[in-house]
Image (cartoon, coloured by chain):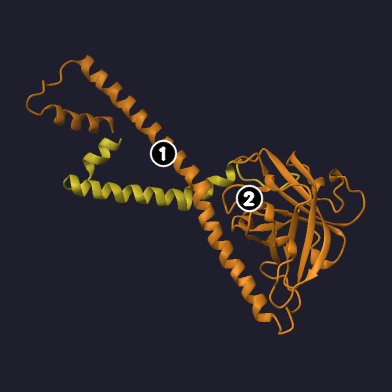
Chain colours: A yellow, B orange
Amino acid sequence: MYGWIWRHLPGNAWAKALVSLVLVVAVVYALFQYVFPWAEPLLPFNDVTVDNQ
Amino acid sequence: MAATTDTDHEEHTAAPGTPPPAGRRRGAGRLAALAVSFLGELLITAGLVLGLFVAYSLWWTNVVADRAADRQAERVRDTWAREAGPSGPGALDTKAGIGFLHVPAMGAGEVLVEKGTSSEILNDGVAGYYTDPVEATLPASGEKGNFSLAAHRDGHGAKFHDIHKIKKGDPIVFETKDTWYVYKVYGILPETSKYNVDVLAPVPEESGREEAGHYITLTTCTPVYTSRYRYVVWGELVRTEKVDGDRTPPKELG
């Protein structure tokens, strides 16, 4: 998978490394900004109130 | 995808010095190896994502929440300062935040208190007073009842992280615009069901009290890092003190 991505990135090794870095940052950003805030309430780690539900 | 990868692979293996690929058995073996390495990469990715989620929950949400809480607390302080007369603070208002909770046993610092216990409120790194299922009685109302609060144990500011450090007899001070309400802890319930809404009752009988009074209740989740049970701390109003011009804290916070 990662090997396939690496082979399909343009340019020489430096360009590939740079693009890879940008991709990694983009993925981490998407996770922190969208995926984790969405997933968190669905997981039973942070319910602090007592209620009758 | 397997086909493309195969061609790629053949290009590589066709490099000078390496023997050409041969036979159906070799091809099937290579496919299996590809599948296994793909699965392995998926598992590594899943591990990394879970690690990132831990970092998100225990670190990043605190950063975001503390920033939000500081901003809101500053707004409340500003409003109070602006409306304060020369002789002392003006009348109470309950917009934005209603006050600050000081619990020396949980460390220095103050926790902004806002209305409601939904995650949108609590995720801003504040403590919320209950409006549901049992509505909290605000201390400023002067009526007898229970001032019930909730805040996060971990992540999102983790304002009640050290709730287990509170012991009986410790002070809990609630600061409003014009009054310090000094409570004393008299009851602790280290573990209870999340359905136990009786702990929020105006007279929380589980704490041992049977008569109406001015109570405060702190709730959060326990054990740390999970939400299996709830941790409850009860306090009782000892006295109130008017806020002076310098907002000198009561001696319990000295």
Of the residues under marks 1 and 2, which one precedes in the sequence?
1
- The disc placed on residue B48 is 1
- The disc placed on residue A19 is none
Can the viewer see residue B220? Answer: no
Q: Position of residue B252 (x, y in %)?
A: 74, 60
Say which element carries label 1: helix
Amino acid on which disc 2 is placed: His
**B146 relative to B153 in the view: left or right:** right
**Residue that extends furthest to the right in the rendered view of this protein:** B211
The chain identifier of the residue carrying mark 1 reads B
Rendered image quadrant of residue B175: bottom right
As rendered, which of B15 and B219 lies closer to the eye?
B219
Q: Residue at x 19, y 29 (%)?
A: B9
1 vs 2, front mark: 2
Pointer 2: what residue?
A: B152
Up the image or down, B127 lies above or below B54; here it is: below
**How many residues crowd mark 2 within 10 Å: few (<14), some (14–19), many (20+)?**
many
Q: How many marks?
A: 2
Q: Position of residue B182 (x, y in %)?
A: 78, 61
As rendered, which of B122 and B71 lies closer to the eye?
B71
The chain identifier of the residue carrying mark 2 reads B
Can the viewer see residue B229? Answer: yes
